[in-house]
Image (cartoon, grey):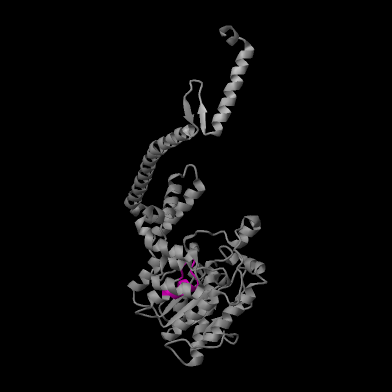
Amino acid sequence: MSACAETPGFRRGLLGCDAQSRLSDHSSGTVQSSRDTIIPLSTSKVEFTGTLDTVLRGRPGESHRRRIVLCATAVVCLLTADVAVRWAGSVLKKYDVADYARKPDVLRSIEMPDIVLMGSSRAKYALVPGVFEAATGQSTYNLGIAGSKTVEWLTLAKRVFAERAPRLVVLGVNASEFRADYLPTAAARHLFTFADLRESIATDGVSMAVTGAYLRQRLSPLWAAYDRRYELKMWGQEQLGGLLPKYAQASRELRRRVAKPCPPKGYDHPWIHGRQRRDLGLRLLEDRAAVVAASRPTFAKRAGPFRRLGQLLGWFHDRGIAIVVAYLPNSPETERRWADIEPQMIDAIAAVCRERGVAFLRCDETDLPRTNHDYLEEIHVGLPLARRISSRIARRIVAMRTQDGQHSRVAVTPEDDSHLP
């Protein structure tokens, strides 16, 4: 028998019997090993479950601790950066223009002038207080702030003129300030209270950009590194002057501009200091492709900026503050590019003024001849043209007062001023 057991056929027979035995046992839920030990089919599942339990009880715990360490490290780094930025606040402040704080603060600190000139950076350069004073004999202050538009003007007027008001406000406007896609993010960032935000939502609808700008105003003191990111960028550029000379120069110029005190009458112009003397005409002749073109505004007659202009004019009327709206002309280059849209926008502005009974002063080419050489760039006027524009507006105001026989405030006249000098 033992001899037979060693033959290959005998082995195959045993293997066949063993396979049949396993198959039959499988149907009954068991597997029989070669040592006649019955092993349940669920054994492998139990072993797998045991291994999974080990994973769940072991590795995730380590991962959890790793996450805690990473989060704690990130928090410490952010707090360290925040403390460093706060400590360097006096250095970073040298790069903060802060027009929404500086110019209104100067106006609050002095006796309220008779005439206040308002608008964006276009008005900041184009309306010269000294020219108005010479023509009218009344004190004048330029409150023009770069980047501001209708909502910023209204909110600023509510803040600055709440207790004291001028006799006359001259509002310098341009088509670019009435673009249909305008959002009052600057007002939300620098001026809004919560009541202003609610009013903005009720009037213009919900805007994540406006809400985000307001939240930045309110929450930024909690995270100085985020609030000061622009100033950090300017400081970093100046420190890397050897690698980034062009950007370092821009940072130095900004720091020098911020260091200068706000002018007593709120007016300043680069040409007064001999800066940016290469006018638009020269730059177009040298390299037209390199000239930065002013973005073409989108026009919608019922757009928010026109409604807001109506609110602004109504607010001044309700408080007995006289106001004149003056259109500040674009360069001939910009007029050429905006030829199909700018006249419509001027007419829409004039219509709002006419509705509110407010004088609207145009500056047509026939009234005020000009060339590209009269401009710093496409949107900002040079100093000689600024004086001519201011003189033109001031003389019209004087003529309107004379016609009405009043000396304390400007007359409210129709929008058509062609009969004026």
Compared to 419, does 345 lie above or below? above
Residue at 32% x, 51% y: name it: 87
Which of the 4 image quarters holds residue 137?
bottom left
> Looking at this view, is 139 or 46 the one in front?
46
Which residue of the protein is positioned furthest toward the bottom in this rendering? 405
* Magenta stretch holds residue 223: no
> Quadrant of the image for the N terminus?
top right
Which x, y percent locates residue 179? 57, 70
Q: Which residues are magenta?
A: 144-156
Tell me, yes or no, if residue 268 can be seen here: no
Q: Position of residue 357 (x, y in %)?
A: 52, 87
- Magenta-span inclusion, residue 147: yes
| Residue visible at 48% across and 80% down in the picture | 311
**Total residue callouts:** 0
Residue 119: tell me if it is visible. yes
Quadrant of the frame with the C terminus: bottom right
Closest to the observer, 212 or 55: 55
Q: Can you say whether 217 is above or below 6 in the image?
A: below
Q: Nearer the viewer, residue 407 or 101?
A: 101
Which of the 4 image quadrants contains residue 16? top right
Residue at the outermost front position: 1
Quadrant assignment, res 182: bottom right
- Camera-side residue of 15 and 47: 15
Location of residue 163 in the rendering, given as x and y in whole percent from the top left corner: 34, 79
Q: Is residue 306 above or below residue 418?
A: above
Instruction: State the image coordinates of residue 334 (x, y, percent, origin top left).
Output: 63, 67
From this view, report whether residue 284 is shown above or below residue 47.
below
Position of residue 165 in the picture relative to residue 402 (left or right):
left
